[in-house]
Amino acid sequence: MPQVIELEIGGMTCASCASRIEKKLNRLDGVTATVNYATEKARATVPGSVTAADLIAVVEKTGYTASEPVTEPVVASTARDPLRDRLLVSAVLSLPVIVLAMVPAWQFDYWQWLSLVLASPVVVYGGWPFHRAAFVNLRHGAATMDTLVSVGTLAAYGWSLWALFLGDAGMPGMTHPFSLTASAGDAIYLEAAAGVTTFLLAGRYLEARAKRHAGDALRALLELGAKTVTVLPSGSREEREIPAAELRVGDHFLVRPGEKVATDGVVIDGASALDLSLLTGESVPVEVRPGDPVTGATVNAGGRLVVRATKVGADTQLAQMARLVEDAQNGKAAVQRLADRISAVFVPVVIALAAGTLGFWLGTGRDTTAAFTAAVAVLIIACPCALGLATPTALLVGTGRGAQLGILIRGVEALESTRRVDTIVLDKTGTVTTGRMSVVAIVPTTGITDDELLRLAGAVESASEHPLGRAVAATANERFTLPPVTDFLATAGVGVRGRVDGVLVEVATGTPPTDLPTARLAPVADPAADRLSPGADSATVRLAPGADSATVRLAPVALSAADSATVRLPAAGRPAAATWIEVRVDGEARGWLALADAVRPSSATAITALRRLGLEPMLVTGDNPAVAQAVAAEVGIDQVFAGVLPAGKVDVVKRLQANGRSVAMVGDGVNDAAALAQSDLGLAMGAGTDVAIQASDLTLVRDDLTAAVDAVRLSRRTLGIIRGNLFWAFAYNVAALPLAAAGLLNPMIAGAAMALSSVFVVLNSLRLRRFAPR
C-alpha cells in the first residue's frame, strides 16, 4: 500500500541541491519524490517496503542531512543566528577593502597588504559555508552553486596572493584604478573575493528572512488552535482545565466569551456568535445555538457555550486546512520543473564556459589579468539561485495568504488550471443558494393572523425531524417562544400533527387556492426595501425569493391615510420555486406557508464578477426546471441544466469539454464530487461534504460564492508572480553571462548582482501578502 513520507532536509544551499536529492530519491524502486528548496522539505510517495530510514540514508549519501518532521511545538530559540554573525563580521572587514579598491586617491603605501589582512578572514571564515558545501559536493562527484562561489572567490583570492608575493602588486606605492569591467596589468582582486563573499552572505541572509516571512501565514494558521481547554467530565458539573491536545471525541468542553473553540464539535448548551475571521477571512460573526456545528480555532464573541467534541487532532478542519496548504507548497509548476532540469546541468556548463572564456582571452593574446577577471566574473554571475526560488516562494506566500482568506489551494496544478478555464458550472443547492429551506411567505385564512399561524405550525414542527419541518420551526423560533406540543405524531409521506394550547394542529403538503387573501411577506424581507418616496404614487416592488407579495410603507405625505399597502402578484404568477404546506386547526384549513431555498445575498454579485474574469457561468441542478430557471434569473445566469442526476452532472462537464471549453465546477455535496473531479478546475464550498472537498482543486472555507471569485483571482495572481519570477531569473542569466564572458563585469559587481537577483525574486513573491478580496 503506497504511503506518503515527509522529511526535513538540511544543508541545501541552492536549487541544484534540491534537484540532486530529488533525482537520487526517485531512483529508488516505486518512489516518487519532490524536494522543495524554499521549504527545505522532501515529500515522497513510497511503496510499503520503503521506510523513512531508507530515504534518510539516500539523502545522507548525497551529502545532506534529513530527519522526520518534529510534531511537537517548536519553541523559539533565543540563540544568536550564526549566519547573521558571519555576515556582520564579513561586512565590517570587507568595507575598508572595497573602499580602498574603489578610490585610488586613498590607496596609501602598503594599502594592498592591509587589504590582504582584512580580506583573508572574510574569504576563509565568511566563505566557509560555500567552501564546505563545495567540498562535500566534490566528494560526491557533483557541482552546485556553492562550487561556483567557492571556485570564484578562491580564484580571485589566489590570484591576488600570486600578484602580491610573486608579481609587482606588493611593491610600495602600487595603485590601480577601480573598473566596472575586466582590468589589465598588475591588479589584485581582494575586494572581489571579500565583496562577493559578503554580498552572497547578505543575499542568503535576506533570502532566509524573506522565506520565513513567506511561511508566516502557514505558521500562523498552525498556531490558531487553543492551547488549553476547560472540560466538563461526564455526569459532573466540575470544570477541569487540560491541554487541548488531550481532548477526545465525545468530550464536553466549555467555551467562555472571548475564548477560542478548542476543536470541532456541536453546541449542546448555550447560544452565542462566533468570529470566524481567523479561518475564513469573513468578518461577520455567525450565530450558533444548540445543535449547530462549530469549528476549532474560531472565537466565541458572545455567550457561554458547552460543546461536544466531534473531531480532534489531525481530523479537525484547522488541521486539514494546514495539511492542504503544506501539500500545495510542495508542488512545482511545469515551467519550474524545466528550470530544475536546467539548474541540474547549469553549474557544469558554467564551469566549462568559464574555462572557455579564460582560454579564448589567452588564445587571442589578451592580458592575463583581464582574461582571469572575465573567467571569475562568469563563475560568480551565473549562480542559479533565483531559478530555484521562483516557484516555491510564490507558492509559500500565495497559499498562505489564501488560507488567511478561507481559500485553500491544493497545488500548483490548480493555479495553472485557473488561467485556462473559460466556463464555470455552479451547483444550485448550497452553492448559489444557502442550501437551507426557510419560510418566505404566509397565507392565512380569515380569522387568524400571520403570527398565530406561524406560531402554531412552528410548535408542531419543532418535534419533527423532516427538513421542511425544521425550517418552519427555525423561522418560528426566531420570533416566538414556542409552546410545548403533546400527542405528536409524524406520518411518513403525509405530515405531522399534535396538540398545541389545547387545539389539534396538522401540517401537511398542500397548495393554497387562488381566491385566498394576499400572501404576506415573512420576516426575512429587507425592511429598507420598497418604500414610496414623498409625493410618489407608485414604486417598483422587489419580492423576496419565493414570495408573491410585499408590504410597501407609505411616506407621511402620501395621500393615503394608511401607513402601508400590500402589493401582490396574481395567483398564476406565484413562484414555482416555493414549496407550500397547509396548516389545519381542529380539522379546518387555517392557512398556508411557502418555503424556499433562499439565494445567497452575494450570489448575483459573484456571478457578475466571474463574468468580468472571463468565465461564462452556468447552473446545474437536480431540481425541476421551473425552480432552476427562477434561481438562475435572480442571479443573472442564462444557461441552465435542470433535473440532472449526479452522473448527469459529469456528462454536462464532459459535453462542455468536448466542445472545447475548459470547465471549472463549484459544488458542495456528495453528488457533486464526480463532476468536481472531472472538471478542469474543481472548487468545493467548505461547508460541503468531505467527499466533495477531496475531489476539488480549491476549497472555499468561506461559505460564500464570492470566495470563488477571490480564489480565481488569487490563483491567477500567484501564477503570474511565478511566471514573472522565472522570466526575470532566466533573463538575468541570459543577459549577464555574455556580459561577464566579454569582460564587461567586475567580479564584485557580478557577485552583488547575483545576490540581488535572488532577493528580488523573494521580494516579488512577498507582494502576494497584500492581495485583498473584492
Image (cartoon, helix red, strand yellow):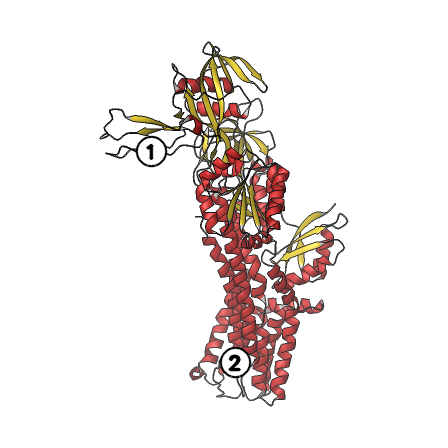
Q: Residue 94 location, x and y as percent? A: 50, 73
Check contact, mark 1 vs mark 2: CB within 8 A: no
Count of numbered tags: 2
Name which residue type carries label 2.
Leu
Q: Residue 495 location, x and y as percent? A: 54, 18
Q: In this view of the protein, can residue 234 be seen by the observer? A: yes
In the image, which disc is placed on residue 530? 1
Q: Residue 588 location, x and y as percent? A: 46, 12
Question: Would you say 148 lies left or right of 293 here?
Answer: right
Q: Residue 273 location, x and y as percent? A: 45, 33
In the image, which disc is placed on residue 744? 2
Viewer-nearest residue: 231 or 515: 515
Residue projecting furthest to the top: 502
> Considering only vertical position in the picture, is 356 above or below 685?
below
In the image, which disc is placed on residue 489? none
Classed neighbour count for the residue bearing mark 1: other residues with Cα under 10 Å, few (<14), some (14–19), many (≥20): some
> Considering only vertical position in the picture, is 328 above or below 427?
below
State the separation of the CA atoms marked 1 and 2. 74 Å
**Who's the residue at 63% across and 43% down the image?**
651
Circle 1 SS class: loop
Residue projecting furthest to the bottom: 365
